[in-house]
Amino acid sequence: MKKISFVLFTLLVISSCTKEHAKEYLSLSGKLTNNTDSIITISGISGLVKTIYFKEDGSFKDTLKVSKSGIYTFQTNSGKRAPIYLKNGFDIAIDGDAEKFMTSFKFSGNGASNSQFIMTQIEKSKDMGNPADILALEEDAFKTKINLLKKEYDSILYSYTDLDSLLKDMASKQNKKMFDYFQNNYASNKKMGKGNPSPKFENYIAFKGGKKSLDSFKGKYVYIDVWATWCRPCIREIPFLQSLEKEYHTKNIEFVSISTDEARRSGGSWEAAEKKWRNFVKEKQMSGVQLWSGEDFNFQQAYQINAIPRFILIDPDGNIVAANAPRPSDPKLKTLFNSLKI
């Protein structure tokens, strides 16, 4: 799921740059073991900066000039890319294993600490896990967790004493933005806690005809999949969802898929968006209850859905069991179902 992810927040936010006025070059060298690629491309937000060729032993060395200091992409093929912080005057060496791309990278030389810092931030963000799980904590546990994370992120930032001022300033601002997000969303997220009445959707268009509302499924558990035809992670979950539907066909649960396809991604037409949804459901032979939300975003907004797919489980009385339920592909979902004796 493309959930709110801080794993790549460094790449997304710190990608802005400042112009370099000094007429200098930087050098880039290193070696990747187990390498099978022939070239390295260095690119930025404005496009390709440099192509560097590997030697037979996986080593490389070249010079290049960047117009702006900032984060660039070090890439050997479409599936292997890593961030690297470049500034004219730097002399950076990279050593790693091509089969463990990015995670094995070690940077050395003048300016290398900037790229190493970015890698450390990314790894810390991965360790943090799903932000939704943090927002679901009880108040005391939430405060303890946030204070611990602040200390850990501050420790990382201040342990690098020679960071470029631009990177340090942006990292500080991004850390503040992240923790502001947690604080600002905690209170509203508690309203979506287990046992609270679920927000409702009403009169969503049903693929098989007519319209459906959340109250249409009163008396049953409702497992909701909020998705869209353009969302690849959503599509990857469809076979797992179909398998679950077959397995729980006689159980007291409805599997409801709500498409959020809208005009902006369908040529500006709501009619085209609905047609795209209908054609997709037919082509994929999607089972369960297939609904289209159309122009009504109230349900998504109430659940603060800003990334899909999103899965929600509601009990027979219309109360929330899990506002951010496990995916169909996650074994934890069946464990949850079993605990509820569905």
Image (tube, rainbow, N blue to C red):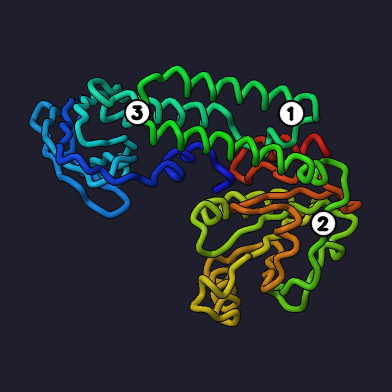
Q: Which residue is mark 1?
A: 142
Amino acid type of the residue that numbered disc 1 sits on in the rendered structure? Phe
Of residues 307 and 255, the one drawn nearer to the viewer in this rendering? 307
SS type, badge 1 = helix
The answer to whether one can see residue 38 in this image is no
Image quadrant holding the C terminus, namely top right
- Quadrant location of residue 199? bottom right
Marks 3 and 2, Cα distance to the nearest angstrom?
45 Å
- Quadrant location of residue 291? bottom right
Q: Is residue 315 left or right of residue 8?
A: right
Where residue 112 sits: x, y (%)?
Answer: 28, 25
**Can you say whether 57 is above or below 187 in the image?**
above
Amino acid type of the residue that numbered disc 3 sits on in the rendered structure? Asn
- Give residue 243's mark: none
**Camera-side mark, 3 or 1:** 3
**Can you say whether 93 is above or below 175 in the image?**
above
- Give residue 114's mark: 3
Residue at the outermost front position: 21
Marks 3 and 1, Cα distance to the nearest angstrom?
31 Å
**Can you say whether 205 is above or below 169 in the image?**
below
Residue under the image location 49 percent in, 40 percent down: 9
Residue under the image location 25 percent in, 36 percent down: 87
Residue under the image location 72 percent in, 74 percent down: 205
